[in-house]
Image (cartoon, rainbow, N blue to C red):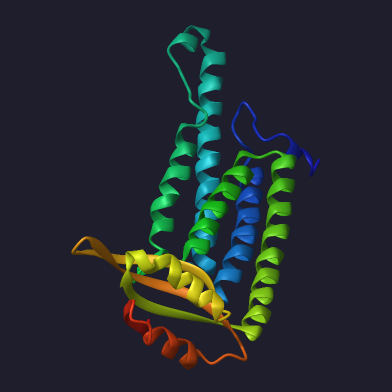
């Protein structure tokens, strides 16, 4: 009796009230689990935001199914309407997939060539997808949603712990440099010769000087724990090809 609530997602007379409530409750737990992980890390979107996104997506999916059920009931009662009543079962749900992008974009912050909040934005999109899955019903959808959350959250925690251990052996630095474009390849060779590992670079500005260009870039790199950052900066500052250099 209890399982039938999950295995029969759509009834021609509309979804049963108990089934709708259960779907919303499941979304509250799943959205809350994802949001709690973001909340304890003081991310832009936290506990309540993820619950609202997951539950909101679920309610829209339920609404779409109720509209479909009403249309089918009308056709059964009056078959003449079969050619005039058309229902797209994915139209309203599709708006969630695209619309959640605007909310996700609000969590991404840009600062001097760097972007933060991308993981939170992706998890908001995931929460919306899980809400849709649960809202459409079916025991397999519930299982997939629960397994997804059970895998994603431990993986995030494990990767964060691994990153914390890695940061104990290597120190990440962020430096702003201005150099001639022709010197770029040699610059990376110089960094490599000092044991410096370049993680990522962002081009801030590019200006023409004579027949060549000068690049202003933000460079992220790691140095061994036993190597002094000041020594690396002094070595780079003494290079005539590097016009400007400072810790960003």
Question: Is residue 196 visible to the viewer in this orientation of the structure?
Answer: no
Q: Is 165 drawn above or below residue 63 in the view shown? A: below
Q: Quadrant of residue 184?
A: bottom left
Residue 114 relative to residue 119: left or right = left
Q: Is 155 drawn above or below residue 100 in the view shown? A: below
Instruction: Choose between 76 and 68: the one closer to the eye.
Output: 68
Outermost residue toward the left in this view: 210
Instruction: Choose between 37 and 133: the one closer to the eye.
Output: 37
Q: Is 4 drawn above or below residue 77 in the view shown? A: below
| Quarter of the image with the N terminus in it | top right
| Quarter of the image with the C terminus in it | bottom left
Q: Quadrant of residue 210?
A: bottom left
**Residue under the image location 64 percent in, 85 percent down:** 168
Residue 140: x %, y % from top left: 74, 40
**Residue under the image location 48 percent in, 59 percent down:** 121
Residue 237: x %, y % from top left: 37, 86
Outermost residue toward the top in this view: 80
**Residue under the image location 56 percent in, 70 percent down:** 38
């Amino acid at each position: 009796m209890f399982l039938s609530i999950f295995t029969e997602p759509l009834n021609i007379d509309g979804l049963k009230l108990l089934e709708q409530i259960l779907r919303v409750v499941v979304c509250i737990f799943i959205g809350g689990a994802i949001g709690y992980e973001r909340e304890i890390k003081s991310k832009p979107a936290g506990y309540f935001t993820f619950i609202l996104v997951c539950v909101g997506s679920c309610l829209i999916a339920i609404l779409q199914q109720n509209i479909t059920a009403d249309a089918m009931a009308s056709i059964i009662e009056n078959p003449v309407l079969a050619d005039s009543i058309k229902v797209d079962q994915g139209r309203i749900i599709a708006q969630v997939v695209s619309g959640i992008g605007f909310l996700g974009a609000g969590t991404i912050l840009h600062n001097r060539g760097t972007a933060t909040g991308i993981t939170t934005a992706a998890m908001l999109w995931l929460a919306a997808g899980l809400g849709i899955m649960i809202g459409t019903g079916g025991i397999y959808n519930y299982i997939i949603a629960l397994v997804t959350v059970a895998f994603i959250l431990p993986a995030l925690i494990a990767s964060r712990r691994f990153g914390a251990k890695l940061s104990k052996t290597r120190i990440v630095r962020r430096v702003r440099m201005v150099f001639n474009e022709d010197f770029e390849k040699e610059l990376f060779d110089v960094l490599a010769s000092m044991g410096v590992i370049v993680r990522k670079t962002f081009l801030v500005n590019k200006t023409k000087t004579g027949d060549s260009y000068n690049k202003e870039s933000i460079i992220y790199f790691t140095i061994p724990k036993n190597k002094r950052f000041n020594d690396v900066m002094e070595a780079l500052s003494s290079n005539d090809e590097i016009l400007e250099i400072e810790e960003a």
